[in-house]
Image (cartoon, rainbow, N blue to C red):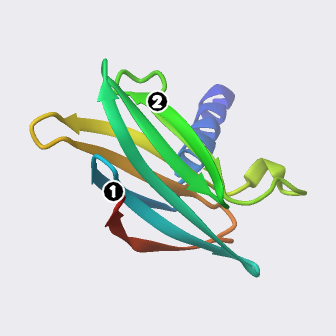
Amino acid sequence: MLARLLFVGVLFVATLSANEYRTMYPVTLKKDEQVSFLVKYATYKREFTLRWTLYVNEGLVLFHTYNKNVFQNILYLNGTNQSFKVFLKPKGADRHEVPYFLVKFNKFDLKKNEAKFEIFLSDKRSQMLIERIKKTIQK
């Protein structure tokens, strides 16, 4: 009986922690097409942008910026290096619950030359206000 109760308790906690993402944004981008999000919290406004430039050897080369810092990642569809996190505010007293974006590479369509992503927002304390900004083409 105790083992059954313990199992139900563990299952309940696992279910609560599994839903850690508040929102999911589906994104489809062609080469050098950019998606942007405005991130607002407290008195701060930051912009997150994402674009890809090259798909070779099943690896997608991405550039993203956040708070005027530029980063490069190479993502693959095989599960290893399929996603990355972008922390949206500095780690402070709530360092275990810092809001972040998780960018996950889902599919590459060779015929259309498009990459599909999901951008998840983890924000357990609902501190962030996110606005998607219209896509633009980089030149």
Question: Could you tell me the amino acid type at mark 2?
Answer: Ile
* Label 1 element class: strand
Spatial distance from mark 1 to mark 2, Cα to Cα?
19 Å
Above or below 37: residue 139: above
**From this viewpoint, which residue is outermost toward the front?**
139
The residue that disc 1 covers is 26
Write the residue at 36% across / 21% down: 78
Q: Residue furthest top?
A: 57
The percent coordinates of residue 84 (x first, y second) are 54, 38
| Residue appearing at x 46%, y 21% in the figure | 80
Position of 107 relative to 48 (above/below): above
Give me the disc on residue 74: 2
Report the quarter where the N terminus lies.
top right
User: What's the residue type where badge 1 is placed?
Assistant: Pro
Instruction: List x then y, in percent, for residue 92.
Output: 88, 56
Which mark is drawn over residue 35?
Answer: none
Residue 66: percent from left, percent from top: 62, 57
